[in-house]
Image (spheres, rainbow, N blue to C red):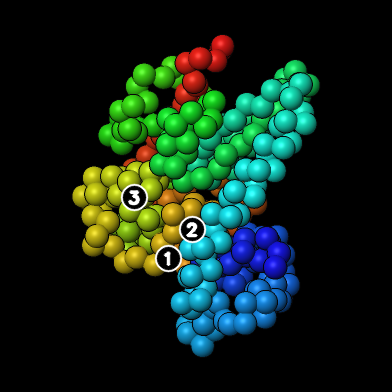
């Protein structure tokens, strides 16, 4: 049995789609399917029910994830401990953050900054949902926390005891696929945007709370009254769904700048349905600035 087979099953469980899971694992869908089949042959039972639409985990698949997922985490933690032990002359700075910020703001910062750091300093990014990232930081498992902040959407009060620095401002903006160059597939304007299928975040995510706050504050909004399409706790999944034409997604502007420039996504309305979000980086108070 190979570790990557369990990671493949985790990806399928997360995305609920062979194509999206394969893309997240950077393999073709056919290669991904072969690896799932290899896992099933090794187990002697099916882990995915392909007769259902959409396909879903079987009882065996759920059992495998429940029992094997901790082993995957343990294996990587062990590897990291060994590597850090071998490279004890190096210092590793751990940054926890949400997936969206890791792809956009943090990736840009690392590109611009890493060359300026001491060669003995390594950066380790711990990407997760923002709530998990906060807990990683509060528990002392990361040195820095990169996160969004909005006055109406506070993060846990425990963060107030940590020093932070303002990094910049991002903005949650409504986007969708184009009908043709520069023209949204769904009619533009506030009311037309709200009448289109809406791609939503899972309720408990930070961006989900931000989207709900923005839409519930709009006279024609109310998130619970809109026509919802896909839902995910990951902005990258909603971006893919928007590009595919499944609805309007409210995404961090930093994540879609390239897509807007290339024309694979377009804005659907003006600033009235956008939400500014500060980007902050918190640091462990024991670390020097």
Q: The residue tagged with tag 3: helix, strand or loop? A: loop
Q: Position of residue 88 (x, y in %)?
A: 74, 25
Write down the residue under mark 3.
Answer: 204
Residue 238 shows which numbered tag?
A: 2
Kindly tell me whether residue 63 is visible in this rendering: yes
Position of the N terminus by quadrant: bottom right
Residue name at image x 34 percent, y 50 percent: 204
> First in sequence: mark 1 or mark 2?
1
Point out the residue furthest to the left here: 219
Is 189 or 125 nearer to us in this picture? 125
- The spot of residue 167 in percent (x, y) is 51, 24
Under tag 1, what secondary structure? strand
Instruction: Give the CA separation, mark 1 to mark 2.
Output: 7 Å
Q: Position of residue 254 (x, y in %)?
A: 54, 40
Q: Are marks 1 and 2 in contact (CB under 8 Å)?
A: yes
Label of residue 173 in the image = none
Q: Which residue is mark 1?
A: 230
Give me the C-alpha separation between circle 3 and circle 2. Answer: 16 Å
Q: Is residue 284 depicted above or below 247 in this figure?
A: above
User: Residue 186 location, x and y as percent?
Assistant: 43, 64
């Amino acid at each position: 049995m190979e570790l990557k087979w369990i990671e493949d099953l985790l990806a399928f469980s997360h995305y609920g789609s062979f194509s999206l899971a394969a893309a997240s694992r950077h393999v073709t869908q056919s290669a991904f399917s072969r690896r799932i089949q290899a896992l099933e042959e090794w187990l002697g039972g099916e882990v995915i029910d392909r007769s259902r639409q959409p396909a879903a985990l079987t009882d065996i698949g759920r059992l495998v994830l429940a029992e094997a997922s901790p082993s995957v985490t343990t294996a990587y933690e062990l590897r990291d401990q060994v590597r850090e032990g071998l490279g004890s002359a190096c210092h590793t700075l751990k940054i926890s953050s949400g997936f969206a910020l890791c792809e956009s703001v943090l990736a840009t910062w690392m590109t611009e900054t890493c060359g300026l750091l001491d060669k003995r300093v390594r950066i380790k990014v711990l990407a997760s949902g923002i709530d998990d990232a906060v807990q990683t930081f509060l528990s002392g498992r990361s040195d820095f926390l990169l996160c969004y902040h909005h006055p109406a959407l506070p993060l846990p009060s425990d963060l107030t005891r940590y020093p932070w620095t303002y990094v910049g401002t991002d903005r949650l903006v409504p986007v969708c696929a184009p009908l043709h160059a520069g023209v949204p597939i769904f009619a533009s304007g506030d009311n037309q945007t709200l009448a289109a299928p809406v791609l939503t975040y899972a309720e408990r995510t930070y961006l989900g709370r931000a989207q709900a706050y923005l839409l519930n504050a709009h006279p024609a909004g109310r998130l619970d009254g809109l026509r919802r399409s896909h839902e995910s706790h990951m902005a990258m999944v909603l971006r893919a769904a928007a590009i595919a034409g499944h609805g309007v997604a409210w995404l961090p502007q930093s994540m879609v700048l390239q897509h807007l420039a290339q024309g694979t996504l377009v804005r659907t309305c003006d600033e009235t349905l956008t939400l500014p979000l500060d980007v902050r980086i918190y640091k462990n108070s024991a670390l020097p600035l």
